Amino acid sequence: MTTLHISTNKADLDVPLIYQFISEQSTWAIGMPLPVLERAIDNSLCFGAYLDGRQIGFARVVTDCATFANLVDVFVLPEFRGRGYSTQLMEAVLGHPDLQGLRRFTLATGDAHGLYEKFGFTPPARPASLMERYFPNIYSN
């Protein structure tokens, strides 16, 4: 059985693959321009998931590495789903030394609640205290 390798080395990331998935197949960022994704990667803690040197998954964390983190852009390519790779990716994210002792770790999901609940994520304890500016179609023409 092939072992999943997870790395935070940005030089290893297959940016064209990440871009293709996020801008064409994701449910959250269809149409994202490549320069926006590149800037997001440059300013985030990124996790690439690899099988035999081929990238099959990705996760990105926006964080100050002290008090707060927000998990975004998590995916495993469709042909590799159902094999536990998303769980392994989440274990690597939550085990990263820069993400320990945070006061708040957030994420938004439309369909993966079961995965994230396994790692202690819950609905906000105080949802009335949360606010957002949300532009879901910002990348649409």
Image: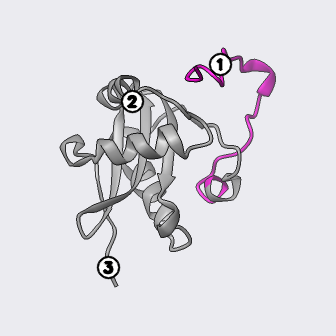
Magenta stretch holds residue 122: yes
Pointer 2 local density, CA inside 10 Å: few below 14, some 14–19, many at least 20? some
Residue found farthest to the left = 11
Protein image colouring:
one colour
Q: Secondary structure at mark 3?
A: loop
Q: Is residue 88 above or below residue 13?
A: below
Query: For the stretch drawn in magenta, what is the main secondary structure?
Result: loop
Label 1 near label 2: C-beta < 8 Å?
A: no
At x 70%, y 51%, the residue is 111
* Left or right for 126, reference 74: right
What residue range appears in magenta? 116-141
Camera-side residue of 115 and 20: 20
Residue designated by label 3: 2
Q: Amino acid at mark 2?
A: Leu
Q: Secondary structure at mark 1?
A: loop
Measure how far apart labels 2 and 3 are at the Cα level: 29 Å
Camera-side residue of 3 and 16: 16
Residue designated by label 2: 37
Magenta stretch holds residue 31: no
Any mark on residue 102, and which?
A: none
Residue 134 in picture, x, y percent from top left: 66, 19
* Left or right for 5, reference 106: left
* Left or right for 18, reference 123: left
Q: Is residue 11 above or below residue 91?
A: above
Pointer 1 local density, CA inside 10 Å: few below 14, some 14–19, many at least 20? few
Residue 66 in picture, x, y percent from top left: 40, 28
